[in-house]
Each structure stands twice: as structure tokens, then as C-alpha cells.
Image (cartoon, rainbow, N blue to C red):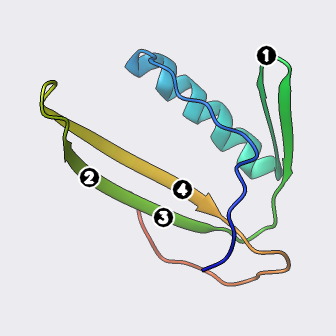
Amino acid sequence: MGKETRLFKSEERKSRSEVSAFLGQLSEKLAEGQVVLRQGNDEIILQLPSNLILEVQVEDEDKRSRGIQHSLEVEIKWFDNDDQDGSLELG
């Protein structure tokens, strides 16, 4: 397994409408091919290729004292110079 380096991380509580608005803005930036993430003085600029790897995962995790934590994880990955297509559909 290769070495992983974290370049940026953010985790914060937001309302459902705020999350929806963020994802809408992210969608627009994905379509444009460039995403800029900023938090405080941290900033990262991502130049995205035309083909991406989309990973969607749903998990339940027992957090004991707080109960079951549910998660819907959407991960977008890419390799340099990768031009393969995918077939996941949103229903």
C-alpha cells in the first residue's frame, strides 16, 4: 500500500441546507475543472481531469455512549492522465 499524505482536512457541523448548498457549489466547481478549498489561512487548489473515480459508501458505526453514527461518504479520486469512464447513477 502506498504512502498517504493529508493535504487538507475539514470537519464541522452544518445544517442540511448548508451541506446541500456546499455540495451544489462543489458540483459547479467540479464541472469547471478546478476546486479551491479554503479554511482560515489554509488553501488548496485542485486541477481536476475530465474523468474521475467516484466512490460512494454508506456506513453505520456504533459510538457506544452516543449511539449509532450513520455516514454517507462521497469520495472523488483521480490519477494523473487517467481517462476511464464509470457507470454509477443517482436515483
Q: Percent from the top left, x then y, of residue 88?
A: 44, 70
Against 88, residue 20 (above or below) is above
Q: Percent from the top left, x then y, of residue 56?
A: 42, 60
Label 2 is placed on what type of residue?
A: Glu
Q: Which residue is mark 1?
A: 40
Residue sitting at 41 percent across and 15 percent down?
Answer: 15
Question: Considering depth in this image, is 57 or 5 the residue closer to the camera?
Answer: 5
Residue sitting at 39 percent across and 21 percent down?
Answer: 16
Q: Which residue is mark 4?
A: 75
Cβ–Cβ under 8 Å for marks 1 and 3: no
Which circle's residue, 1 or 3, is located before the other in the chain? 1
Quarter of the view holding residue 44? top right
Label 4 is placed on what type of residue?
A: Glu
Cα–Cα gap, marks 4 and 2: 14 Å
Cα–Cα gap, marks 1 and 3: 28 Å
Q: Which residue is mark 3?
A: 55
Label 3 is placed on what type of residue?
A: Glu
Residue sitting at 36 percent across and 59 percent down?
Answer: 57
Q: Is residue 46 left or right of residue 20?
A: right
Residue farthest bottom in this picture: 84
Cα–Cα gap, marks 4 and 1: 23 Å
Say which quadrant the N terminus sits in.
bottom right
Cβ–Cβ under 8 Å for marks 3 and 4: yes
Say which quadrant the C terminus sits in.
bottom left
Which circle's residue, 4 or 1, is located before the other in the chain? 1
Q: Secondary structure at mark 1?
A: loop
Q: Secondary structure at mark 2?
A: strand
Against 3, residue 1 (above or below) is below
Quarter of the view holding residue 84? bottom right
Label 1 is placed on what type of residue?
A: Gly
Residue 91 appears in view: no
Q: Is residue 13 left or right of residue 57?
A: right
